[in-house]
Image: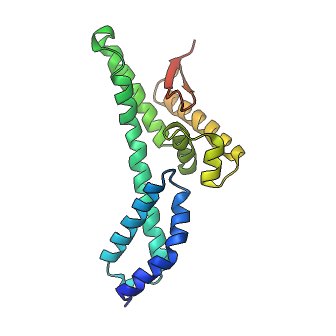
Amino acid sequence: MVHPKSLANTYMELLPALRRRLARLFANPADVEDVLQETFVRTSRVDVGEIKSLKAYLFRTARNIALNELNRKSRTITSYIDDVCGGEVPASSVPVDQQVSDRLQMEAFGHAISSLPEQCRRVFLLSKLYGLKQKEIAKHLKISQSTVEKHMAKGILKCRDYMREQGYDGYNIRLVEADSGEISAERTP
């Protein structure tokens, strides 16, 4: 049986490596610290006597918590987009059917983002949600700027394809730099 003291010792030994691994996933250092804290709390509650490798268990737990947090954040994009777009136009100036259509379209776009591959979604969100520039994303994720550009292009294409699959054939997704805060879909002729 693994003694709780050895769990704490193993955690402290692995803390720098865990922090580096999580820093690849999150732009905000506070998010990394939150995941690290949650990892320790969760592992300290479990009977670790059956665990063969504490190192693997700690890394897997941290990874699962991080992925859950990233998924939660990407689901909030739909709500965020809805909140931003929903409050800009008075209800009386746009017909109800158009409001419903716009809402469904923005929801589909949120789902398109959340359906992107993990690394692609991470790059996309760091750019569009956190407002990081491509060079900052490359440094943060320890990948080349060219890879960031490829992930952004892939994300835009996959989102466009997803929207077409959902029946938004005449729409072209146009993403503008995060500084302007603009994410829109426009009908193309």
In percent of width and height, residue 84 lies at 38, 27
Q: Nearer the viewer, residue 180 or 161?
A: 180
Q: Image height check: is 136 above or below 12? A: above
Name the residue: 57% across, 30% down: 177
In percent of width and height, residue 59 lies at 48, 70
Examine the image and state in which quarter residue 110 appears. top left
| Farthest-out residue, top | 93
Q: Nearer the viewer, residue 139 or 78?
A: 139
Task: Locate the N terminus and report the quarter of the image it occupies.
Answer: bottom left
**Number of marks in picture:** 0
| Colour scheme employed for the rendering of this structure | rainbow
Q: Nearer the viewer, residue 3 or 111?
A: 3
Name the residue: 56% across, 64% down: 20
Task: Locate the C terminus and report the quarter of the image it occupies.
Answer: top right
In percent of width and height, residue 31 lies at 43, 55
Examine the image and state in which quarter residue 9 appears. bottom left
Q: Image height check: is 148 above or below 66? A: above
Q: Nearer the viewer, residue 42 or 71?
A: 42
In percent of width and height, residue 130 lies at 50, 41
Name the residue: 58% across, 34% down: 156
Q: Image height check: is 42 above or below 180? A: below
Q: Image height check: is 125 above or below 50? A: above
